[in-house]
Amino acid sequence: MSGADEFGIRPGEEMADLPAAFDAGLHFIGRLRTPWRTRRDCPKNGLQTDAVCTVEVDPAYASGLLTITGCTHLILLYWMDQATRGLVVQQPRHADGPRGTFALRSPARPNPIALSVVELIARAGDTLRVRGLDCLDGTPLLDIKPYYATTDSRPEARIDRAGAEP
């Protein structure tokens, strides 16, 4: 589903002509269970909620969870299956002008891959309880990776909110 009906295209936004065929295939390894059923209800990022959510890993991949409880935080990669595909220029509601898709964290993009750093609360078999998700209930899960503060954190990183081009 493209998601164009719910998510729409705003004035000033630009779509790319997507290729007719895909370059790669993916296997969803599970689903994310959250309290949010509509885009309007969903937080803009995982820091805006304390909701405990569930990561359901398909049984075929459950052995990949071995020793995962040694991690306090995880990186979840997921497929925003209801997002508009192909936007390359967007008009965010919070911005005073258009922005390039690759300068935004919006789910509307050629490949709607999202990520969240989540706190791992518990594991029970092939499910994980986590805090820090920002997606709709039933979102397909692509991958789980450990979060390493020593290599993943970049405290010096900055974003120029004006978005000025050189």
Image: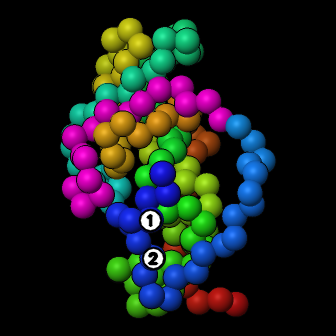
Instruction: Give the vertical position of 161 relative to 126 (above or below).
Output: below
Q: Position of residue 4 (x, y in %)?
A: 44, 65
Q: Amino acid at mark 2?
A: Ile
Residue 50 visible to the viewer? yes
> How many numbered circles does the render carry?
2
Residue sitting at 55 percent across and 54 percent down?
Answer: 112
The answer to whether mark 2 and mark 1 are in CB contact below 8 A is yes
Q: Which mark is residue 56?
A: none
Residue sitting at 58 percent across and 80 percent down?
Answer: 14
Residue 40 in magenta stretch:
yes
* The one of 87 and 123 positioned closer to us in this rendering: 87
Q: Is residue 113 left or right of residue 57?
A: right
> In the image, which residues are magenta?
26-41
Residue 17 in magenta stretch:
no
* The one of 82 and 71 positioned closer to us in this rendering: 82
Q: Is residue 64 left or right of residue 17?
A: left
Q: Earlier in the sequence, mark 2 or mark 1?
A: 1
Q: Is residue 17 left or right of residue 148?
A: right
Q: Dot 2 corresponds to which residue? A: 9
Q: Residues within 10 Å of mark 2 (few under 14, many from 20)?
A: some
Per the image, label 2 sits on a secondary structure element best described as: loop
Q: Amino acid at mark 1?
A: Ala
Instruction: Give the vertical position of 159 relative to 140 (above or below).
Output: below
| Quadrant in which the C terminus is drawn | bottom right
Q: Position of residue 87 (x, y in %)?
A: 57, 71
Residue sitting at 62 percent across and 61 percent down?
Answer: 110
Disc 2 to disc 1, C-alpha distance? 7 Å
Q: Which mark is residue 4?
A: 1
Q: Is residue 113 left or right of residue 71?
A: right
Q: Quadrant of residue 43?
A: bottom left
Residue sitting at 32 percent across and 28 percent down?
Answer: 54
Q: Position of residue 100 (x, y in %)?
A: 59, 77
